[in-house]
Amino acid sequence: MENYLAEERSDDKVDFQVLNAIADLVRVLDYNEKVVFVNKAMEDLLGYDSDKKVCILGEDLFDPEITRRALLSGEVIQREENIGGMVFSVKCSPITNKKGEILGVVEVFRNVTMARKLQKEIIEKNRFMTSETMAASLIQRTVLPEKGFIKNLKVNYIYKPSTILSGDMFDVFEIDDENIAVYIADSVGHGFAASMVTMFIKSMIRTLDKLTLLSPKKTLTELCTRFTSLRLEIENYFTCFYGVYNTKKKRIIFSNAGHLPLPIMVRDRGYMNLESKGYPISRFFAKPNYEEKEVKLYSGDYILFMTDGVVEARNSKKESFGYDRIHNIILENNRDVLEVLDSELEEFNDGEQTDDISMLLINVW
């Protein structure tokens, strides 16, 4: 090929000087698959016998079928080669003259050993993280309250994380023989960090003493104190609505740490928001002053708790699900409000969920 190339017009010649200046490993083969040129980079790395025109490591390291295919078809072929414990990405490109006749091929070897090593490490780490994330997700679901009755309260809920892990948390549990605690919380974001905040909320509330738990104001204040003591970044925060239902007095007292949407109490298809003032739990509001309110509950009443993933869900037209649709569902349905709401929400957003969705329903019997 060397002689053949020399016979070609000057503008058809392979510029070996340019190839020699390339940092990647380069070799040129003629139409008979014989090596006619190896650039300095390949010579330095693999060794090269200029008399025999072969790499010292041996030609058996290279796949001749790829070169042969490029010579016959004229196509550019990309492949990988393992040479001397190193991985190379090889591009085999035909060399043609002005008439389009194939004279040979030029093969460029790029060392991707480190890239493949890093890629393998990333894959292994991703596999590990996926396994850990799945385990964390299972734990999150395990700590949710049981559906069914607690005293005269019937508990039902729908819990749909937008990813494997959720930034939502809710719970219903007995404080003592007369009082039942109920809360819903929403941590900013919906990834691993947000899920850890939800587990913090769950563990902290469950470890508070009885006198604190009986007071929604004290509970949220203590929760804020403990959370801010973690000294997390200012963008880490959560909202929380906490209430205590007394089975004898038939009332619920509650406080709200900036949680929206507000819980909706429903009676005979009429509804009212359980509203009280209070900032989200964050280092930005280190000394909050939570308002405490109470409302009577009667047999047949229910309270619907939600996270913002419900009202802020959007359809293909970028419309929000909003409060009006929720209110209409409440007014039009005596039973299965939770199921109807879930069904209409699913239909509204065409199954495309972008935020965590949690709905908790407490019926008074």
Image (spheres, rainbow, N blue to C red):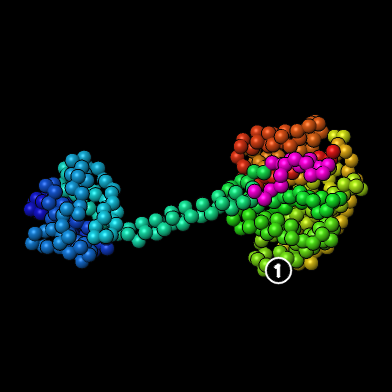
Give the left or right position of residue 172, taking residue 187 as reference.
right
In the picture shown, does residue 218 fall above or below 96?
below
- Which picture quadrant has residue 210? bottom right
- The answer to whether residue 147 shows anywhere in this view is yes
In the picture shown, does residue 216 fall above or below 321?
below
Q: Which residue is mark 1?
A: 229
Of the pair 357 and 248, the residue shown nearer to us: 248
The spot of residue 259 in percent (x, y) is 76, 52
Position of the C terminus by quadrant: top right
Give the left or right position of residue 119, taking residue 111 as reference.
right
Q: Which residues are magenta?
A: 142-158
Q: Is residue 145 magenta?
A: yes
Mark 1 closeness class: few <14, some 14–19, many ≥20 residues within 10 Å: few
Residue drawn where x is 22% and y is 53% of the image: 107
Q: Is residue 247 magenta?
A: no
The spot of residue 194 in percent (x, y) is 64, 56
Give the left or right position of residue 105, taking residue 287 as reference.
left
The spot of residue 263 in percent (x, y) is 79, 46
Please, what is the three-letter code of the amino acid marked with disc 1?
Ser
Residue drawn where x is 69% and y is 45% of the image: 358
Give the left or right position of residue 216, taking residue 118 as reference.
right
Residue drawn where x is 28% and y is 56% of the image: 88
Of the pair 232 and 182, the residue shown nearer to us: 182
Of the pair 266 and 285, the residue shown nearer to us: 266
